Amino acid sequence: MELIKDVVYKPLKAIPDERGRLMEMLRSDDEIFDKFGQAYLTTAYPGVVKGWHYHKLQDDHFVVVVGMMKVVLYDGRDNSQTKGMVNEFFMGIHNPSILKIPRGVMHGFKCISDTEAIVINFPTELYNYENPDEYRVPAHSGEIPYDWNRKDG
């Protein structure tokens, strides 16, 4: 798949042993690391869509640690060579990975597992409670050319 400009997708490696497993998600010496703002988790229940939104100041770094999510990006940036492009990523327990979502790229996700899915995000900026860096478009408004429905075939 051709990626939207400045998006980085990296598979992660879980290291299992008889006690359990260990998986590094983001390191300060990783090529996708710019800076640390904070870490937080967000969840979605089965079938729930959370989207669309974008940031003007921060990049996000998503890792789905429980369940499965369909993470979708849309490049609506006027100055981007990939303007209008959509990327889909199926991330989670069956496909451990980290996704760098650059500022300005619309993104959202849908829980596609049978149980609640958990996303850990490592944004490059702190959340500003007085002036949040979040700009939203309703998930099903049609403003973004994407259908959140499952594609059977």
Image (cartoon, grey):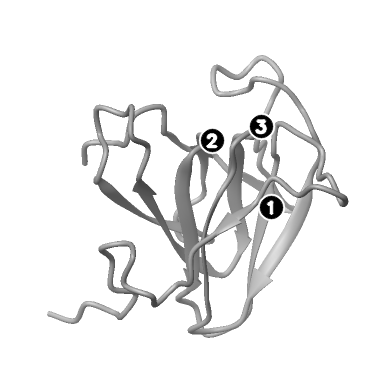
Q: Nearer the viewer, mark 2 or mark 1?
A: 2
Compared with residue 28, is residue 109 higher up or lower down, i.e. above or below? Answer: below
- Disc 2 and disc 3: Cα gap in Å? 18 Å
Q: Amino acid at mark 2?
A: Arg
Q: Residues within 10 Å of mark 3 (few under 14, many from 20)?
A: some
Q: Of marks 2 and 1, which one's residue comes earlier in the chain? A: 2
The answer to whether 129 appears left or right of 87 in the picture is right
Q: Quadrant of residue 105?
A: top left
Q: Of marks 2 and 3, which one's residue comes earlier in the chain? A: 3
Compared with residue 114, is residue 37 higher up or lower down, i.e. above or below? Answer: above
Q: Residue at x 28, y 66 (%)?
A: 146
Q: Quadrant of residue 118?
A: bottom right
Numbered circle sitting on residue 103? 2
Numbered circle sitting on residue 26? 3
Numbered circle sitting on residue 37? none
Locate residue 125, reporting x and y percent.
75, 33
Q: Of marks 1 and 3, which one's residue comes earlier in the chain? A: 3
Locate residue 149, reporting x and y percent.
31, 80
Q: Residues within 10 Å of mark 2 (few under 14, many from 20)?
A: some
Q: Amino acid at mark 1?
A: Ile
Q: Amino acid at mark 3?
A: Leu
Q: For mark 1, what is the residue?
A: 120
- Disc 2 and disc 1: Cα gap in Å? 17 Å
- Disc 1 and disc 3: Cα gap in Å? 11 Å
Compared with residue 53, is residue 16 higher up or lower down, i.e. above or below? Answer: above
